[in-house]
Amino acid sequence: MPRPVLAVLILLLSGGVAWAQPTFMSTGAAVRRIELSPESASDAVEVSISSGLSSTILFDSELAREGVVLEGRERFSLVDIGQATIRLIPADGISPGDRLRLVVRFRDEAAPGSATFLLVAHPAKAEPFVEVYRRKRGVETYREEAREAKAEAQRCREENDRLRAERSAPQGLAGLLSMGKVGSGGVEDSDLGKTISRGPGVAVVVRQAYGYRSALRVAVDVLMAFPEGGQPWTATGAALRDKSGKELNVLQVWQVAPTSSEKNVRVIIEAEATSDSARGPFSLKMWEAAGPRIVTLSNIAFP
């Protein structure tokens, strides 16, 4: 068995150093709902935004367009203020961790008369839709929230069952087989070295790249070289997005601990995917914990 395949088999089981993928709202996520009250009107509500991705805030009241104040408006490629909506697309110049204030005022005289949002820039993910309510909501809204809470509880139960099954499974290849994560064809692999391309971000050199697929998982194993003289880089999060913008559920990001003398960085990203949900090509974004250095790779296709 080739050594890269063996490494991914070990990763899929759980060996080694891994960083948990942060829980974050992304494209395709459920609509986030916020209720404003006179008591909380002065509190700033955080909304995650990301360069090139659309975020829309929908209100249940008409806006006073002349009363909308956006800090750093020139840093957005699109600012569309409608009768009761605000759509934002940050430009490429916005940096991860940037925090920009958005203040809106409503046309009627009901309380609260305004709302404040803190737009927090993330390297690769954004909240696509945020609904804001000022008035007492009807029974159907509460029923919808109850349905969402029930669905979330079900997802948590399924995740708990999955984790229990993995902990009770045998180690090695037997563990993968027992959990149904390897089909009759085993783990398929493909060399991405000739097709993968670098997108905007850190100017890394891709030394080698492989894509892998098992019955329920995919993985990308990439060896990169960073520019000379740079600080060590550690991947703490990643997003695998297809050409329509839909993301795979990234399970873990694994990296050999970087050193100041090591020029090459090896990162493996593992995600949930069936054969139908992992049709390429995909783009891959990887980011560090508290820094602007983002690595973007595109044209990734799994076997």
Image: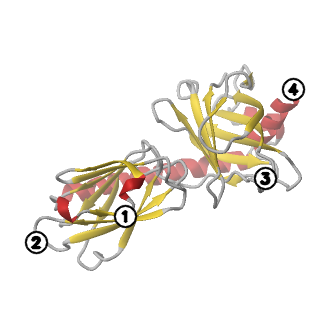
Tell me the SS state at disc 4: loop
Question: Which of the image's four quarters has the C terminus?
Answer: top right
Q: Are marks 4 and 2 in contact (CB under 8 Å)?
A: no
What's the residue type where badge 3 is placed? Val
Between the residue at mark 2 and the residue at mark 3, the CA separation in whole angstroms equals 56 Å
Question: Percent x, y for residue 267?
Answer: 75, 43
What's the residue type where badge 1 is placed? Glu
Dot 3 alpha-carbon crowd within 10 angstroms: few under 14, some 14 to 19, many 20 or more: few
Quickly name the residue at label 3. 17
Nearer mark to the viewer, of 1 and 2: 1
Q: Which mark is residue 109?
A: 2
Q: Are marks 2 and 3 in contact (CB under 8 Å)?
A: no
Q: Which mark is residue 155?
A: none
Give the mark nearest the N terminus, 1 or 2: 1
**To which quarter of the image does residue 65 belong?**
bottom left
Name which residue lies at 12% across and 64% down.
107
What's the residue type where badge 4 is placed? Pro
Give the mark nearest the N terminus, 1 or 3: 3
Give the mark nearest the N terminus, 2 or 3: 3
Identify whether 161 is placed above or below 190.
below
Q: Which mark is residue 71?
A: 1
Give the mark nearest the N terminus, 4 or 2: 4
Quickly name the residue at label 4. 2
Identify whether 301 is placed above or below 61.
above
